[in-house]
Amino acid sequence: MRNVYTIVALTLLLLIMVGRSYGQVTIDAEFRPRSEFRGGFNQPLADTLKSSFVTQQRTRLNFNYNGGILNARITLQDARVFGETDTKQPATATTGSIGIYEAWTELLLFSGTSFKIGRQGVQFEDGRLFSLSPWSNTGNAHDLMQLAYTKGSFSGQVGYAYNNQKALNADTTYYTVSKMYKQLAFLHATQTIIPGLDLSLLGVDEGFHTSLTNLDLYHRYTMGGTVILKKKELPFGCFLTAYYQTGKSAATVDLSAYLLALKANYTITEKLGAIAGLDYLSGSDATLEATKTTTFNKLPYGVNHSFNGYMEYWGTLPKGGLINYFGGASAKINNRLSTDITYYGFLLDKPMTFSSTEVKGSIGSELDVVFNYKLSAATAIQFAWCGYFANDNTNLLKFKKAEVSTKFPQFAYLMFTIKPQFYKTPAVVN
């Protein structure tokens, strides 16, 4: 631990000295404790079980350097649950997760073109496929290299990663890190068609080891894009998304699936707005042969919390797919306080069968109520209450049986986000 403090102190001193001479240095932090009441989060809670109350905290220390030709970022992160270490254990106890969230450097090769390498967060559009996952206590980051190009209203990125669990002299070890690829490549491009209307395209190739004894890669391909309408002069906007998947969802399972999504918003007054939308994630027929699937594979690098309800009941997609329609309203009560209310309805795309019982149609609905309060420029508070209206189909999918006595599913949380800035290179006065 003493070595960690020494490295941080030396890095801080070096950044300040370099920043004063060559570029802009900022040092800031994030403290984000969140207390949660879980009385049916993710799935209904049996009557025989007690609801839980848990507090999680994410702490980050960010070192940023912007030198124009050379940029860099280092983010130290500690993510933990209150009480997982005793009062005498240091913050580096193995039950915590202190470490590096991001550590990358970016070099400007020539005008509009840059190369970035290291541990880095990746976010495209609304985060459906790739997201920083800000809700998660740990966030998402990848070890990869990325080439970016920007000119006028066009921007594009090409990324590549090849993963190993340790430094090997021969590629003879099965890669077993959960929900991770052995190889990743992506191509992303965004073009402004007319002011206020953007088109983005994304192609993703994920490679996974076939088996413990066969280290050849099988591939899952996802391709598609998003049309974004957002213009100040218009009272409405929308996100229209479409993706198609092919290749393999597992070593012996052929994949052919799709996702369609529409989200529209309308500004009624300066302080009142409305949203409505539909997510359609294709599913598989119960009679489909085992070597094929038409169920869309949600990529684990996206964000669940922003889609299909805050209670994340369908973060793992049912084999029968998912149709999610939603609508809601947002209100700005004053300069500090705002609220969002959203209702979600869920249906299966294709019927499913459990012990000769067919499950089709509605699998429940959800209501989310969120309040946001801005205490200061550096401090925000968020409170939410969510309720899930389960039915027999919900229980069949979650428990594999309908005759389950459960409590009314509820989830609530109170989250503080505090982002102080400790240091910024003083402005140079000529």
Image (cartoon, rainbow, N blue to C red):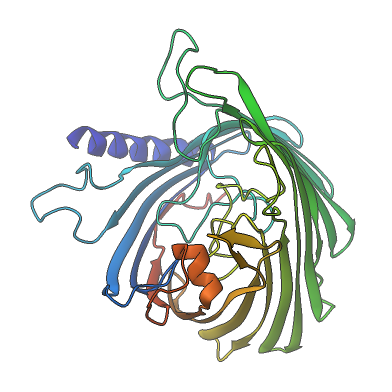
* Residue 94 shows in this picture: yes
- On the image, the x and y values in percent for residue 207 come to 62, 29
Tell me which residue sits at (67%, 89%) in the image: 272
The answer to whether residue 286 is left or right of residue 305 is right
Tell which of 383 and 313 is nearer to you.
313
Tell which of 290 and 375 is nearer to you.
290
Tell me which residue sits at (53%, 38%) in the image: 142
The quarter holding residue 360 reads: bottom right
- On the image, the x and y values in percent for residue 298 come to 62, 51
- On the image, the x and y values in percent for residue 43 come to 44, 68
Tell which of 291 and 85 is nearer to you.
291
As drawn, 275 above or below 350? below
The quarter holding residue 76 reads: top left
The answer to whether residue 418 is left or right of residue 237 is left
Tell me which residue sits at (22%, 41%) in the image: 94
- On the image, the x and y values in percent for residue 117 come to 56, 30
Considering the image in quadrants, where does the N terminus appear?
A: top left
The answer to whether residue 80 is left or right of residue 339 is left
View extreme (right): residue: 194
View extreme (left): residue: 88
As drawn, 366 above or below 270? above
View extreme (top): residue: 169
